[in-house]
Amino acid sequence: MPRPGRIESVFLNIPYDEAFENLYLAYIVGLTQLGLRINVTLAVPNQGRLNTIIDLIERSEFSIHDLSRIESSRGIPRFNMPVELGLALYRSRIAGGKHGVFIFESRRYRAQRSTSDVNGIDPQIHGGTARGLMAGLRNIFRQPGDVTTVPEMLASYRAVKRKLPELRRNSGGKSLFEAAVFQDITVAALVESQKLLGRRTVGASHGTAGR
């Protein structure tokens, strides 16, 4: 059986609101830790936004669609996530399955009720926790030869979370859902990933020296 190739990029379709901040951070850290480039719509202006979303999906090998917060917000349901899910499913179809689609939810069986047309896709259930989300990410995106563990991913998540006050100050804003802050969080996640690799290298060399 041929060895699977590395995954390069993923389109991330999530809600941008304060109540989702912890999971937003977990997605960025977890996917970065697994070696993926994240394509998001944060920096996309409203003018021509739909075409840009389609372009981001087409440039991604996979997409994640978190449907855990599509319920009504201020009396208005959130349709952005299901719309982008539909675009990704169409992309998967016309690309002959070369674009993989994954759904994440906080509760079992809710996605089957809220978007019954996708009953053939088994959602990853994160339970609203960073640990549950990272377990789901590792389950579907573990790279060839990678030995990253969920505890390691959570350690990086906590390290980046401690930097958030500084990242907010540097951006001059309060929201994490801004292009500049997203880039800063990604860089911080990459730094933690490099630290992890460094610790592994040191541990491996010590293990070799002790033989």
Image (cartoon, helix red, strand yellow):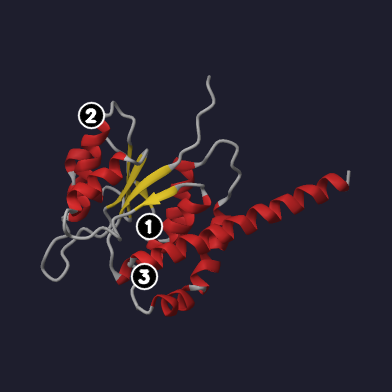
Say which mark, if any, is on residue 31.
Answer: none
Q: Position of residue 29 (x, y in %)?
A: 48, 58
Say which mark, if any, is on residue 127.
Answer: 1
Q: Please, what secondary structure does the residue beneath circle 3 have? A: loop
At 20% across and 42% down in the image, what residue appears?
A: 87
Q: Position of residue 124 (x, y in %)?
A: 37, 46
Q: Nearer the viewer, residue 33 or 49?
A: 49
Q: In the rendered structure, which amino acid carries the disc numbered 3?
A: Leu
Q: Which is more N-terminal, label 2 or label 1? A: 2
**149 above or below 118?**
below
The answer to which quarter of the image holds residue 28 is bottom left
At 38% across and 79% down in the image, what residue appears?
A: 172
Mark 3 and mark 2 in contact (Cβ < 8 Å)? no
Q: In the rendered structure, which amino acid carries the disc numbered 1?
A: Gly
In three-dimensional space, the C-alpha distance between marks 2 and 3, rounded to whole angstroms, equals 34 Å
Q: Which is more N-terminal, label 3 or label 1? A: 1
In three-dimensional space, the C-alpha distance between marks 1 and 3, rounded to whole angstroms, equals 22 Å
Which residue was labeled with disc 2?
Answer: 94
Say which mark, if any, is on residue 176.
Answer: 3
At 72% across and 50% down in the image, what residue appears?
A: 201
